Image (cartoon, helix red, strand yellow):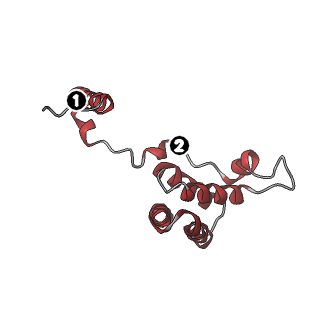
Amino acid sequence: MSETKNPFEAMIAQYQEMAKAMNPALESFTPKGFEHLWPTMPKDMMEMFFGNTLNKDGLDAKTRLLLTLAALTVLGGQADAQVRMTVRHLVEAGATKQEIVECIGQMSMFAGIPAMTRVMDLAQEVMADNEESET
């Protein structure tokens, strides 16, 4: 019997070979850091778009971003780029390291320890990068 790939695996293998032929450097391409192409919005802009500028009694941008981080954690910490971007925006919106860590830690009750640990690692990486860039 011959071992056959399913159509999806065959398609992915074909695309990988095509990418190698076009640009050999793509063989080692990683999307990590790709989210830096999207700039961090200034705090005032986040408040205008996502905060309580239009809804005076609504949630501020920092609270909305903390909710977003909680949701990304509950989803299992599978969206690395989105987690890193959210943490970057949280820092810009004025969230402290303690607030970010507590938000992620609280979600361990709903997402489980593996998801919480994964998101915590991503968040700490972003916060460490931010601290290095400030010095």
Is the residue 124 above or below the residue 82 in the image? below
In the picture as drawn, the residue positioned furthest to the front comes out as 1
In the picture as drawn, the residue positioned furthest to the right comes out as 56
Question: CB atoms at circles 2 and 1 under 8 Å apart?
Answer: no
- Pick the residue in front: 129 or 17: 17
Residue shown at 56% from the left, 54% from the top = 72
- Pick the residue in front: 114 or 93: 114
- Pick the residue in front: 23 or 66: 66
Asked whether residue 131 appears in the rendered view, the answer is no
Residue shown at 71% from the left, 55% from the top = 61
- Asked whether, in this view, residue 90 is left or right of residue 77, the answer is right
Is the residue 111 above or below the residue 54 in the image? below
Image quadrant occupied by the N terminus: top left
Q: How crowded is mark 2: few (under 14 residues within 10 Å), some or many (20 or more)?
A: few
Q: Position of residue 59 (x, y in %)?
A: 78, 56
Asked whether residue 124 appears in the rendered view, the answer is yes
Q: Residue 17 carries which label?
A: 1
Q: The disc labelled 1 sits on which kind of residue?
A: Glu
